[in-house]
């Protein structure tokens, strides 16, 4: 495949980083592996001893694991947003960030469901879902939606990477396995007009499919809670609320990832202030939307003040229980990103990243506050003398597995960056074509208008 | 000498066969439970084992045989039955015999309660009352709706049961049940091997780690024409059990027409607004036999204090 000068330069910049690893990089990977091993240890303990080692008990039957599950699935929206919406809109600046976004999607769609497995009492009976699956159960909807979403995202990433894979295939690598791998994955793509046309069409179709799929995945997830008869969960707003929260956190994680890679790989020439500004403004709009949903959700249940709803609300607003967490997640974590990005004076790469970190943390806490206070408030009184049955406290096992998930996320990201350049190297021709097309159309419209005006003018002249 | 011994053993043999035969005809169906060994009483009993041998067993290890349906049959339900329970709140004084009997019957840990007794107070000015709560075996069960593998199911006789050999332990049913009726096996109960032939969803024993359990209305007892253990255990006859098709409920000593009892005593569904259509009805706590304070006697002072506090309306 023939490469232009820019792509060759990019390829020569990325490949040394792909094939080697620095000393500090080794240390960082080592730390990640320690966390992952810690998680494995916790997993073994949980399998051997049973779920008694977690903080979950008969009232709070879902804890940190399910909060993590929603969180990771939410993050996966980064890819859906960038690859889907920005691709369909043919936004020019998406090119350098599209791969990072898609990788976030795929990794988090793998890690998220793993937390559901951790929450299952009988992992050894996973095959029962296939043997006895009931389509009436929202869990089956979830299984179907998430697996479809994962496969769709992988196809999308693959299609968007074929040009780079072809370029890597033609690069004289020393390692044989790399040569073999890239030759296999590039499926003899050589960038001729016909292949390009098919590829573009495939990408457009996939991005059109992935948007409704992403909305569906998070709606179904919200319905797991919304379908139950529980105060704080049984709400019609839940599906769109979850979707907005997911895009919000996904954009936040994307901004953080861009910042990290920009620093780590010195990508200042690829990932510029424009990306942070545009993504920041998207984050701000989503933050405002999310804040609106939050306000609407709690205002209606407070104003109506049914006994059960109020019991959950009192827990959220009680300084001895969840108030500070609620304040951070629903007020500070929304207001700060919105205000900082809103005011141009405060808007720069570091501040946008900082508020993204706050927003992502706030969203994780919010997921915790969706699960735990509701489960701690059953409809019947909590007359149990065992304190752990009344108040949920995550155990060290659950924390270890939570950190292991985050570490695994970073580690898989690292692995990906060793197989593919983290920024797409070879740009398709669709972008320039599209701009030209637009120009042509505009010119044609203008010509027609000028003609019409001339005709009108001549008619007026004739009247006179 | 040898002859005498033989004679003796022959006599013993006749005696043994006779007792075994009586036991078999009597139909009480005594069987030795091998899965748990209790303290030996010293007295032995002779029983006929399934393979036709006579065995001597310590009396302490003998319990009534339970003959539940297994496998697919446990999903079908007892024909022409529609089980229903009526709980008379006017009679309850928190004796907690239903709880302990249930725990014994279902081999539960002392903390696990499939029937719970709550102290309820609807508002600040209304009277507190004790409120025994089994599983409601709803006609529109939210738990059955959400189960991804059909491990919990509704039968034709109205019962909602759990198949612990199919349950994957996702706990969705526990969040779906608005009445906190379900209990999870958080650790290995240590009740024998994983695929036990004796396991039946109708008895729920032996328990399996990582699965969900709950009140099952003792359908294996119903198969033998007996009442659930919480009904027979109650000293005050609070709990009535029966068949809606026959329109009769009984607590073992008194029997009523179900429809008349509900009509005369203003029977109601707990939280009927949830639309779950329970098969457990409550009779309101009017003209009570006991003061609710009497119920604190069965509790430790610590427990009593906790119960009193838990009904104070905070807000």
Image (tube, coloured by chain):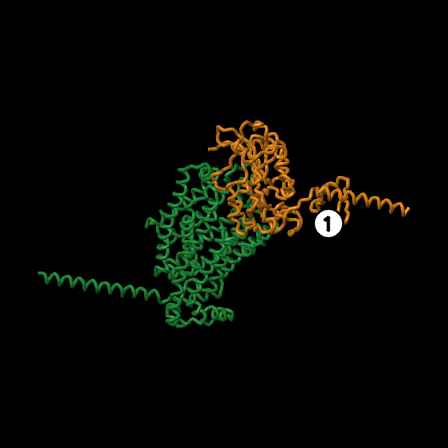
Chain colours: A green, B orange
Residue that badge 1 annotates: B50
Residue B306, percent across and down? Answer: 56, 33
Q: For the residue labelled by badge 1, is the local secondary structure a helix, a strand or a loop?
A: loop
Relative placement, left or right, of A251 versus A122 is left
The location of residue A81, given as percent across then percent down, is 40, 56
Residue lying farthest left?
A: A464
Q: Position of residue B112 (x, y in %)?
A: 60, 41
Residue A342 visible: yes
B41 lies left or right of B297: right
Q: Which of B302 and A302 is in front in this view?
A: A302
Classify residue B40 by image quadrant.
top right
Which is nearer the eye, B185 or A89? B185
Label 1: chain?
B
Pick whichever, A307 or A409, lies toward us. Answer: A307
Confirm whether residue B306 shows in the render: no
Total numbered circles: 1
The image quarter in which residue A273 lies:
bottom left
Q: Where is residue B118 in the image (x, y as percent from the top left)?
A: 55, 35
């Amino acid at each position: 495949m023939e490469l232009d000068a820019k792509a060759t330069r990019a390829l020569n910049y990325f490949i040394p980083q792909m094939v080697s690893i620095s000393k500090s990089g080794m240390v960082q990977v080592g730390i990640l592996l320690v966390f992952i091993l810690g998680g494995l240890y916790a997993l073994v303990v949980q399998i051997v001893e049973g779920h008694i080692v977690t903080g979950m008990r008969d009232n709070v039957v879902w804890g940190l694991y399910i909060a993590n599950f929603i969180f990771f699935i939410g993050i996966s929206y980064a890819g859906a947003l960038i690859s889907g919406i920005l691709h369909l809109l043919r936004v020019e600046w998406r090119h350098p960030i599209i791969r990072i976004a898609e990788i976030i999607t795929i990794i988090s769609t793998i890690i998220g469901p793993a937390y559901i497995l951790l929450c299952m009492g009988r992992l050894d009976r996973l095959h029962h879902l296939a043997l006895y699956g009931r389509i009436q159960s929202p869990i089956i909807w979830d299984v179907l939606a998430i697996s479809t979403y994962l496969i769709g995202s992988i196809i999308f990433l693959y299609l968007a990477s074929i040009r780079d894979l072809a370029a890597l295939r033609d690069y004289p690598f020393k390692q044989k396995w790399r040569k073999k791998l890239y030759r296999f994955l590039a499926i003899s793509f050589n960038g001729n007009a016909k292949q390009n046309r098919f590829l573009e069409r495939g990408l457009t179709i996939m991005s059109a499919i992935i948007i409704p799929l992403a909305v569906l995945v998070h709606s179904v997830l919200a319905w797991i809670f919304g379908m139950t008869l529980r105060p704080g969960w049984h709400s019609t707003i839940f599906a769109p609320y979850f979707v907005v929260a997911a895009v919000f956190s996904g954009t936040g994680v994307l901004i953080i990832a861009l910042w990290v890679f920009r620093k780590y790989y010195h990508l200042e020439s690829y990932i510029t202030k424009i990306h942070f500004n545009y993504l920041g403004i998207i984050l701000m709009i989503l933050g405002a939307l999310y804040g609106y949903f939050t306000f609407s959700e709690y205002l209606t249940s407070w104003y109506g003040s049914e006994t059960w709803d109020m019991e959950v609300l009192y827990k959220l607003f009680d300084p001895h229980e969840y108030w500070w967490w609620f304040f951070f997640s629903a007020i500070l974590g929304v207001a700060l990103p919105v205000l900082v990005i809103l005011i141009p004076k405060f808007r720069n790469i570091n501040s946008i990243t900082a508020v993204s970190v706050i927003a992502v943390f706030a969203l994780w806490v919010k997921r915790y506050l969706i699960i735990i206070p509701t489960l701690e408030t059953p409809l019947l009184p909590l007359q149990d003398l065992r304190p752990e049955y009344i108040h949920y406290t995550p155990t060290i096992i659950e924390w270890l597995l939570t950190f292991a998930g985050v570490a695994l996320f970073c580690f898989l990201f690292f692995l990906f960056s060793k197989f593919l350049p983290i920024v797409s190297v070879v740009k398709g021709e669709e972008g320039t074509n599209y701009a030209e097309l637009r120009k042509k159309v505009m010119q044609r419209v203008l010509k027609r208008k000028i003609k019409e005006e001339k005709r009108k003018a001549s008619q007026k002249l004739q009247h006179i | 000498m040898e002859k005498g011994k033989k004679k003796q053993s022959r006599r013993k043999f006749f005696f043994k066969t006779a007792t075994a035969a009586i036991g078999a005809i009597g139909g009480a169906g005594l069987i030795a439970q091998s899965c748990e060994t209790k303290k030996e009483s010293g007295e032995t009993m002779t029983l006929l084992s399934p393979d036709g041998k006579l065995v001597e067993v310590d009396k302490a290890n003998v319990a009534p045989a339970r003959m539940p349906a297994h496998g697919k049959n446990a999903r079908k339900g007892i024909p022409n039955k529609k089980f229903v329970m009526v709980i008379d709140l006017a009679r309850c004084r928190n004796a907690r015999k239903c709880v302990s009997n249930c725990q014994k019957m279902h081999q539960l840990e002392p903390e696990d309660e499939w029937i719970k007794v709550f102290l309820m107070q609807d508002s600040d000015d209304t009277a507190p009352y004790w409120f025994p709560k089994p599983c409601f075996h709803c006609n529109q069960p939210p738990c059955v709706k959400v189960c991804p593998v059909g491990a919990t199911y509704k039968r034709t006789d109205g019962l909602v049961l759990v198949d612990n050999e199919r349950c994957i332990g996702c706990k969705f049913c526990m969040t779906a049940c608005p009445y906190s009726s379900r209990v999870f096996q958080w650790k290995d109960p240590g009740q024998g091997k994983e695929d036990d032939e004796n396991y039946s969803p109708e008895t729920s024993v032996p328990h399996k780690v990582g699965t969900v359990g709950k009140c099952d209305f003792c359908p294996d007892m119903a198969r033998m024409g007996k009442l659930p253990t919480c009904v027979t255990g109650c000293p005050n006859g609070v709990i009535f059990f029966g068949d809606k098709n026959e329109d009769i409920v009984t607590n073992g000593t008194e029997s009523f027409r179900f429809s008349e009892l509900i009509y005369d005593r203003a029977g109601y569904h707990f939280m009927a607004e949830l639309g779950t259509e329970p098969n457990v009805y409550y009779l309101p706590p009017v003209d009570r036999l006991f003061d609710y304070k009497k119920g604190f006697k069965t509790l430790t002072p610590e427990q009593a204090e906790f119960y009193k506090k838990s009904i104070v309306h905070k807000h």
